[in-house]
Image (cartoon, rainbow, N blue to C red):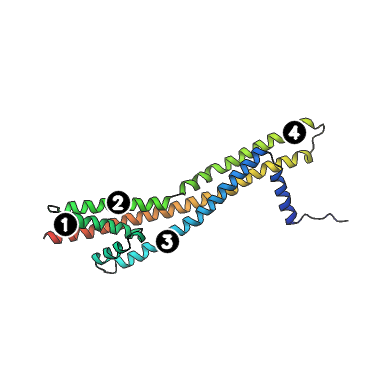
Amino acid sequence: MQPIEPTAAQDGINMLALVLHASIPVQLVMLLLLFGSVASWVIIFRKKRVLDRAEEEADRFEERFWSGAELSKLYAGATERNREIGGLEAIFEGGFREFHKVRQRRGGDSRMQLESAQRAMRAAASRELDGLERNLEFLANVGSIAPYVGLFGTVWGIMVSFQGLANVKEATIATVAPGISEALIATAMGLFAAIPAVWAYNRYATRVERMSVRYDTFSEEFSSILQRQAHLEEA
């Protein structure tokens, strides 16, 4: 009679049974890793939407900006929907607002106008980058800490298994295997939580860095435009 091969459903039940029969510290470790993994995936999907939207908004605004539209009209459109703007448009709005504010004061020369606009653009860019970088630190922490948390659960589980052998006259693989299997699940869960978090952190950190370079480049180009405009008005 041929032995019955275990099905996938039976494997799942066995895995669940191993988790349920693990010691309390190991179960707490698994619960912590499960929370870290779920939270990481939530952040991964949300961060992707945020970065995709930031890149799309930057593309649309740059297309309008370099199409030859008047700066005053772009500024008026940005101020009308002030709470909805972000990215490059927020940087443009902050710089142009400060440029106009200083120009309307008496005694404000072109250098003062330009420096005020540049400070406003740097502040706006910092706010935008803070929003893009939010929660990336959590992904980095999960990626670096989760394997060690899982390893702690494994070591603890193996210690409990070997302590149980003290009451057994004859130790066999069948005696030790369940306890070691329970412990190794913690390591597997640690890797399952860490690998996507590390990958997402590296990818998103690179995308944020590219957006930072893009913001800086736009600020420099817009500063040159404002500088030419200020000199023309003084001439």
Tell me: 169 left or right of 27: right
Tell me: 235 left or right of 114: left
Q: Which mark is residue 122?
A: 2
Residue depth check, mark 1 versus mark 3: number of the one nearer the observer: 1
Query: Label 4: few (<14), some or many (≥20) within 10 Å?
Result: some
Q: The residue tagged with tag 2: helix, strand or loop?
A: helix
Q: Which mark is residue 53?
A: 3
Give amino acid for label 2. Arg
Horizontal and vertical percent position of residue 168: 80, 32
- Residue at mark 4: 164
When asked about the image quadrant of residue 235, the answer is bottom left
The residue shown at (70%, 49%) is: 16
Q: Quadrant of the N terminus?
A: bottom right
- Which is nearer the N-term, disc 4 or disc 3? 3
**Measured Cα–Cα span from mark 1 to mark 2:** 21 Å
Q: The residue tagged with tag 1: helix, strand or loop?
A: helix
Residue toward you, 73 or 214: 73
Q: Are marks 1 and 2 in contact (CB under 8 Å)?
A: no
Q: Are marks 4 and 2 in contact (CB under 8 Å)?
A: no
- Residue at mark 1: 104
Q: The residue tagged with tag 3: helix, strand or loop?
A: helix
Query: Label 2: few (<14), some or many (≥20) within 10 Å?
Result: some
